[in-house]
Amino acid sequence: MKVNIPLKKVVDNSYDITIDTLPAIHFDTKVAIVTNPTVAALHLESLLAKISAKELHIITVPDGEEYKNQTSIDLILNSMFENRFNRKSMLIAFGGGVIGDMTGFASSIYQRGIDFVQIPTTLLSQVDASVGGKTGMNNKYGKNLIGAFHQPKAVYIDPSFLETLPSREFGAGVAEIVKMAVTFNRDFFEFLESADLTNKDVLAEVIKRAVQTKANVVAQDEKEHGIRAALNYGHTFGHVIENETKYKRYLHGEAVAIGMVLANMTSMKMGLMSEDEASRVKTLLQKYNLPTSYAIKDIEKFYETFYLDKKSADSAITFILPVGIGNVKITDECEKDLLLSVLDEMGAAR
């Protein structure tokens, strides 16, 4: 005996990404702005001048990737319960990728899901983390292993927030931009090689191109069943590096930069990328003082940590490898000996 529940339907999760000076925004409901002390000190006053709501609260969580955990999620949820938020209430993520991921995740699970809006303040979050609906938190096993796909209702990207961004944070964002150009857009990569990102107009154009590139991919594959996985170029290696260094030594984009170099080394060994192309990618990363080497102390342990990656399945490890510049291959056919040789070379280069 069977009872069928007919749930097939089309859900429209479309939303707009506005790249401009932040407009005045009114919400006819309870709203909480989730931020951290660093962003609050720099920008909260200017944000409050633009935001109005039926009832407005501020939730402040500690600053840093190491706080992207269950304790911080509980802090957000508890504040919402204490202030009697309901299913029509809303969260605003005001900060970088850590704030955006945690705010999105908290909104996805509070009373089985409420709306949230992204107002990213770092280059990395503006071009990557705020777009596409990936939310989550870290645990002792790895990065973003707990989370949900939960699309924001809107994203407001105001490049003026970047004026107070430290140079390391800016470089971390550039790493994600380079990632998208290498995997999907050779013309964009060539533009980046000569672009002056200190020019506000050029920077705005780069943000737009990066966001459009990611939006095109997300529109094809919202929940990463296929081509969207290519946006994890550099991340399979990078997440292991972040895990090994307890999320304290490198910013996320810095770990991804090292990961891209390792992915390029793998591609070269497999005949997918030339030495000249790999060198161009490394040169562009180094232009923004991004790290491109890492002291791997135990290559076997590093290799085993790959199996905690979300893209891996059973005994197969999925890698995102560039095919030249502007194309990409998603594969689980990288031989262990080849990968160990790449890791050994990286370790020997320190």
Image (cartoon, rainbow, N blue to C red):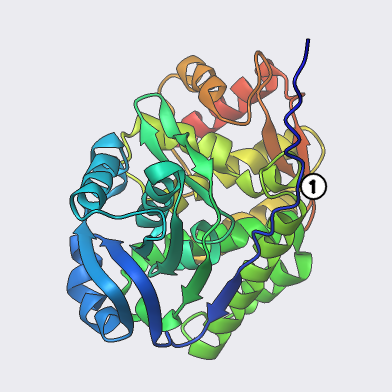
Image quadrant in which you'd find residue 178: bottom right
The residue lying furthest to the top in this view is 1
Could you tell me residue 234's position as x and y percent?
58, 44
Up-down relation of residue 10 to residue 317 (above or below) = below
- Which residue sits at x=65%, y=23%? 317
Up-down relation of residue 275 to residue 144 (above or below) = below
Q: Nearer the viewer, residue 303 or 146?
A: 146
- Kindly identify the amino acid type of the residue bearing the numbered disc 1: Val
- Which residue sits at x=69%, y=76%? 191
Could you tell me residue 226's position as x and y percent?
76, 41
Read off the residue under disc 1: 323
Could you tell me residue 125's position as x and y percent?
46, 62
Residue 248 visible in the displayed image: no
In the visual, does 232 lie left or right of 327? left
- Which residue sits at x=50%, y=61%? 130
In the visual, does 37 lie left or right of 176? left
